[in-house]
């Protein structure tokens, strides 16, 4: 079992069980104030935007161009922390990861 520490969009903290082998978004969207993920993971809505804390942020694979384009259009974009959670595969070694749900835009 791998846990994710999540700060939801209202600032409340939760521990969520990560769904290994699925996108990070799948583990975040069941929270009441979790990620919306309106496009269902098609990398076209940016409503799954989240901030990933270190050391996990820099250990993830690079953003693809389409992910980065969507992120850079957001007012809340943070160069070192912003990711679309639908574009990250959650793996067992991400146990303990800390994630903050980005504000709605
Ligand atoms: S769910 Fe729409 S971009 Fe991630």
Image (spheres, rainbow, N blue to C red):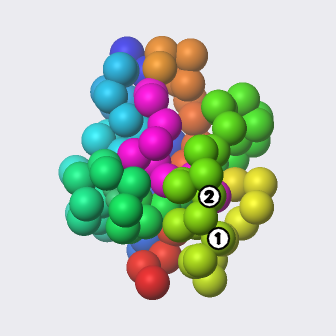
Q: Is mark 2 within 8 Å of ligand 1?
A: no
Q: Would you say residue 50 is visible in this rendering? A: yes
Residue at 32% x, 40% y is 27
Of residues 94 and 61, the one drawn nearer to the viewer in this rendering = 61
Residue at 29% x, 41% y is 26
Image coordinates of residue 19 in percent, x first then y, are: 32, 27
Bin the neighbour count of mark 2 within 10 Å (Cα to Cα): few under 14, some 14-19, many 20 and up: some
Image coordinates of residue 30 in percent, x first then y, are: 22, 51
The answer to whether residue 95 is above or below residue 63 is above
Bin the neighbour count of mark 1 within 10 Å (Cα to Cα): few under 14, some 14-19, many 20 and up: few
Q: Indicate left or right for 83 with 90 as reference.
A: right
Residue at 71% x, 66% y is 78
The answer to whether residue 35 is above or below residue 93 is below
Name the residue carrying label 2.
Answer: 68
Say which mark, if any, is on residue 85.
none
Image coordinates of residue 8 in percent, x first then y, are: 43, 62
Q: Indicate left or right for 97 with 6 as reference.
A: right
Q: Which element type, helix, strand or loop, lies under badge 2?
A: helix
Say which mark, if any, is on residue 72.
1
Residue at 48% x, 61% y is 49
Q: Which residues lie in the magenta part?
A: 82-90
């Amino acid at each position: 079992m791998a846990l994710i520490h999540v700060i939801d969009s209202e600032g409340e903290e939760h521990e969520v069980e990560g769904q290994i082998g699925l996108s990070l978004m799948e583990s975040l969207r069941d929270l009441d104030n979790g990620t919306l993920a309106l496009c269902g993971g098609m990398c076209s809505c940016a409503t799954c935007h989240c901030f990933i804390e270190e050391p996990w942020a820099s250990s993830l694979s690079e953003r693809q161009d389409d992910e980065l384009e969507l992120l850079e259009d957001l007012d809340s974009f943070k160069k070192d922390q912003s990711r679309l959670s639908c574009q990250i595969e959650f793996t067992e070694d991400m146990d303990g990861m800390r994630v903050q749900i980005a504000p709605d835009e």
